[in-house]
Amino acid sequence: MAQDTSQKVSRPDRNRPTVGPAYERGIRRVIIAGLLLAITLLMAFTPIGFIPVPTPAGSATIAHIPAIIGGILEGPLVGIIVGLGFGFGSMLSPAVPVKDPLVVVIPRLFIGVTAYFAFRLLRRANKGVLTVLLGILLVFMLVSSYEVSKRTLWLGIILGIVSVGVCAWLYLWMMREDLLVFSLAVAGVVGSLTNTVLVLSAAIWRQVPGITPQVALGIGLSQGVPEAIVSAIVVVAVVSALRQIGTRRGSRL
């Protein structure tokens, strides 16, 4: 009797390598790290990333935000890689007068690391701890607004209003039991302040001309805190959007 070959059921090839979750996560991390690194270098080599300001630092930056996002999304290693790119981009950027790698490269390695741990820890914190952190954040923002108002009154007033509005917005999210937005915002602030504090501390340690402890404190209050506010807003917007996209596709972001 002739066999009916049309009814044969194909069997999977046992010798064919299977792609597991760990492999997929590794590929995703490489892709995200490469994308964020490219964005960082684009910011570092164009006026987008370094905004000229009349302070001894010479410029304010938003080029550290991809390192924060990388750390939150894919962990400390990706944050370190993107932060390293930010540091080398800063050294090569004409907007950054300091070319000491101990000042402009090494401190940037910790941006994504601190943002990652802040995000993970805050998602497990209770409302009491979060309320205290929010109060501390508001105080820093208002002090920064006061420092800015000494130079430009109208800008300091606007910054103060924005600071109160941002903290009120975060408080409402916290009361709604949605700690994701709150955690993302604070992680953005922590990553940004890591950049400000470590770079200025390294500048004092390396005795960069014009950067004394008093000058560094003024830069940190008048420039570092506004950078942190911008970082919080961008990080919340970008990471929240990516998480929604990942949820729709069934992936874990």
Image (spheres, rainbow, N blue to C red):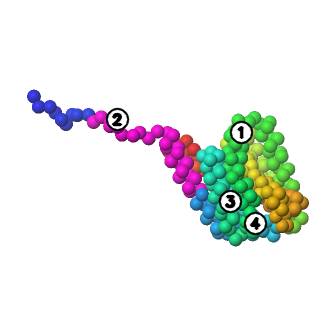
In the image: residue 42, left or right of residue 155:
left
Based on the picture, tell me whether residue 143 belongs to the magenta stretch.
Answer: no
Counting residues from the start of the chain, the first of labels 3 and 4 encountered is 3
Q: Quadrant of the C terminus?
A: top right
Q: Which residue is drawn at 75% across and 69% down?
A: 97
In the image: residue 2, left or right of residue 144:
left
Check disc 2 and give the amino acid type: Arg
Place of residue 35 in the rendered image (x, y in percent of width and height, measured from the top left): 56, 56
> What's drawn in magenta, residue-wise?
10-36
Task: Name the residue that disc number 3 marks.
Answer: 87
Instruction: Estimate the spatial distance between the alpha carbons at disc 1 and disc 3, rounded to whole Å.
Output: 26 Å
Q: Foreground mark, 2 or 1?
A: 2
Instruction: Estimate the spatial distance between the alpha carbons at disc 1 and disc 4, rounded to whole Å.
Output: 34 Å
Counting residues from the start of the chain, the first of labels 2 and 1 encountered is 2
Counting residues from the start of the chain, the first of labels 1 and 3 encountered is 3
Q: What secondary structure is found at the residue carrying circle 3?
A: helix
Q: In which quarter of the image is the N terminus?
A: top left
Place of residue 47 in the rendered image (x, y in percent of width and height, measured from the top left): 67, 69
Q: Foreground mark, 1 or 4?
A: 4
Task: Name the residue that disc number 4 marks.
Answer: 98
Q: What secondary structure is found at the residue carrying circle 4?
A: loop
Q: Foreground mark, 1 or 3?
A: 3
Instruction: Estimate the spatial distance between the alpha carbons at disc 2 and disc 1, rounded to whole Å.
Output: 43 Å
Check disc 4 and give the amino acid type: Val
Contact (Cβ within 8 Å) of mark 4 with mark 2: no
Task: Name the residue that disc number 1 marks.
Answer: 121
Q: Outermost residue, left direction? A: 1
